Amino acid sequence: MCLGPRDQVSYTFHYYLHARFNGPLPMSAPQPVRLEDYRPPAYHVEQARLRIDLSGETARVDARLELRRNPAAAPEDTALRLDAEFLELEALHLDGEALDPAALRAADGALVIPDPGARCRVETTSRFRPAENTALSGLYRSGRMYCTQCEAEGFRRITPYPDRPDVLAPFTTTLIADRTACPVLLSNGDCIEAGALDEQRHYAVWHDPYPKPAYLFAVVAGDLSCQEERFTTASGREVALRFYTEPGNAGRTEHALASLKRAMRWDEQQYGLEYDLDTYMVVAVGDFNMGAMENKGLNVFNTQFVLASPDTATDADYEGVEAVIGHEYFHNWTGNRVTCRDWFQLSLKEGLTVFREHQFAEAMGSAAIERIRQVRLLRSAQFPEDAGPMAHPVQPKSYVEINNFYTATVYAKGAEVIRMYRTLLGDTPFRRGVRRYLERHDGEAATIDDFLACMEEASGADLQQFSRWYHQAGTPQVTVRDEYDPEREVYTLHCRQHTPATPEQPRKAPMHIPLAVGLLGPDGAPLPVQLAGEPADEAAHTRVLELREAEERFEIAGCPQRPTPSLLRGFSAPVAVEYPYSDDDLAFLLARDPDPFARWEAGQQLAVRVLLAEAAGEPRPGGLERLEAAFRGALEAPGADPALTAEVLTLPSETYLAEQLEVVDPQAIHDARAGLRRALGQALTAHWQALCEQHPGRPWRHSAEEAAQRRLANLALSYLVAGSPRHLDRALQQLERSDNLTDRLAALAVLADSEAPQAERAIEAFHQRWRDEPLVVDKWFRVQATASRPDALEQVERLTRHPDFTLDNPNRARALLGAFAQGNPACFHSPDGRGYRLLADHVLALDARNPQLAARLLGPLSHWRRYEPQRRTAMREQLERILAQPALSKDVHEVASRSLEAAG
Ligand code: B3K
Ligand code: ZN
């Protein structure tokens, strides 16, 4: 079969793997995939040649696969399995002989050829309709362009293929499309040929020499603008960096391009890793299920994480772009050159790459601030997951739908596990271990065990107990008590660890936990932390204690006075620490701890105490005054870093507060937090006003320093208005006069909380002004969805009928429904259950179109057991209602059924 550009259609067979494109799968109980059932693939693909014709409504894909039996496969595994979904298969040939696909079809739609021989060639012709692909998995249309998303299992929607990450092949892809509609044709690797096919159509041939799994495959076709720059690698190779957008977004990729260059240089300097192709392409796509995708040489990005201009992106968005650009670039080694053997190893690439992304962000900005933000996210997203019905280890043991396991646990806790290797082994052995892993497994599909083995070899350490971090779910709780012996001048820390039961894991073994500890003398001076029996080291002000037992103690010598402990410095492990600090201790640590992370942490703990007591209806005597004094101290501290001050002055989120309680009443938490904001707004009015006036005032510029000043000024504005609505005018003025989205949006958020008519008019005017900018309109929806006002639920109901609202665009659906369910606990958890019904209605509407997104949005309902009885019942009813629907996707089915089953 010829796979060059051609125009012949051979209708050997008409065969429908599924009757309706994107229709529901035949409904039977979805079967879990288990790690313990892993078997090596029966066949390797030595060459994959594709010809994708996008010139008609129906895409046509001709594939020619050269296959070879895998010597490592079990002798009885002789069948070749080609995964396939939602494809109309027209032809199937084995070594030139036509086969009858109907006879080879497995129950799940795959084609299984019983014993095709030691070497074989399989040719297929399939068709599908990209415009009807609303699941955004496989090849689909976004606006007027075509693009792909193949991770985890989207490639099987393009052509029949062994769609598993341990089958790696070099790909040659010929792309054909209309010359006017799609002048740009892209795929992985380098373009080796291009030209006109006839009057209407043209083609391009791309070759990717690096063997890769199908999940890293990509094509893009469309009328796209390109911004190009060059990068010279450390060894002197020239790389073309090309960023493609729809023409309306041209000129908004500068920041992303600059970020990419920084990431490339950083990876060379820190890990000695260079880019390996002649071109690195990034395409901005408006309809995308997640943030971005690391396809080899051809990243596809959600517009939100690549486009940036002062009018359409906030300071936080600029930071997000840099982080995600870095993340996807770092995958080129950790994920692409060395990939995963199976999806149970997902954290092998994601945990490691998130950690590298974090290191990069820490190097580009302030390490302490970055760390605080990482921990905030971990605590608000991963800790609840670990404590809920979807709890799973960093290496899950089974799944029904792998897309449900791209979780905070696999990503963020996975990154913490990588950080702990470095903390325990030291930076140099850690890097040696990473190098060894990448060298040994280059071009392979590896496992988490392979990574751990490299770390052990590079350091000589025994990491067997440490490996439990991959296998045990749940957040370990570390309880610390202390005693002081003035005679011996010995200070003793008693540490007890316990990991709570999680679904399917009732009992846990002790973990290997690095607990970074510092000590402060009564005057605030840092004391050396010298373990009894070890040589004195005056410089050792932070010491990593290694917890391995359920209970153990550590004696610290040379303490002339009882010290105050500073525990879990830098958040050295993803655990919750409990120590009986007095409020005075916390205020002292907030003011004096030399570790900025620990200072922030002390302030948060103090606020948590005050807020939880208030929410329980038992206000802590003197609590507010103490917090006010602590805030005043932070505001008046000479030479303080504005970025850290802003973090300290930001109260813990309602989600994090809820996380501290056995039984949650979201309204009580909200009222406590709103009340405290009001009180602090009033008590410190003069300080907030002064901060507002210190706003940079200069024309907007992207810089960490100015972003920190804006953050602090906008935080001050929100406290001021929380203290008294008479400051609303200030917000209105800011909205009108600002030259950047950060300040406009901060003002808009303050106005959205208010029911004053002028605030409502301003919100409407904002929409009128920015209605043609989808990313800004997303924010407009988000601000209203998360507004702190009693009628936010009615607003959200109204906004679901707004002409700009659509479930077809994931960013828009997340901006309204996701933001509401996650970011507005008081209104989402309206006791009459209307918030739950609203969410469930939309999850069901979405499920038939985009199950991945539907399952994500469903997440907040899964925590139903944590709520007080009325809400608990109403949440459960919606989960039951969802589960009772016929033809549910396995994505939503898995989340709903696990939520109802597990006693999480
Ligand atoms: N690897 C992708 C995520 C794919 C999600 C599939 N449901 C982006 C990333 O982590 O870099
Ligand atoms: Zn990733």
Image (spheres, rainbow, N blue to C red):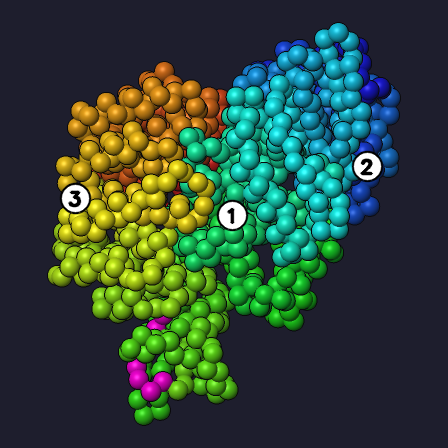
Does residue 157 appear to the left or right of 69 in the view shown? left
Residue located beneath label 1 in the image: 411
Element under disc 2: strand
Residue located beneath label 3 in the image: 723
Does residue 75 appear to the left or right of 866 in the view shown? right
Q: Residue at x 21, y 51 (%)?
A: 687
Element under disc 3: helix
Please provide the residue range marked out in magenta: 559-567
The amino acid type, in three-letter code, at marker 3 is Gly
Q: Earlier in the sequence, mark 3 or mark 2?
A: 2
The amino acid type, in three-letter code, at marker 1 is Tyr
- Cβ of mark 1 under 8 A from ligand 1: yes
826, above or below 4, in the image: below
Q: Residues within 10 Å of mark 3 (few under 14, many from 20)?
A: many
Give the residue at the far top of this rendering. 199
Q: Which is nearer the eye, 149 or 677?
A: 677
Q: Residues within 10 Å of mark 2 (few under 14, many from 20)?
A: some
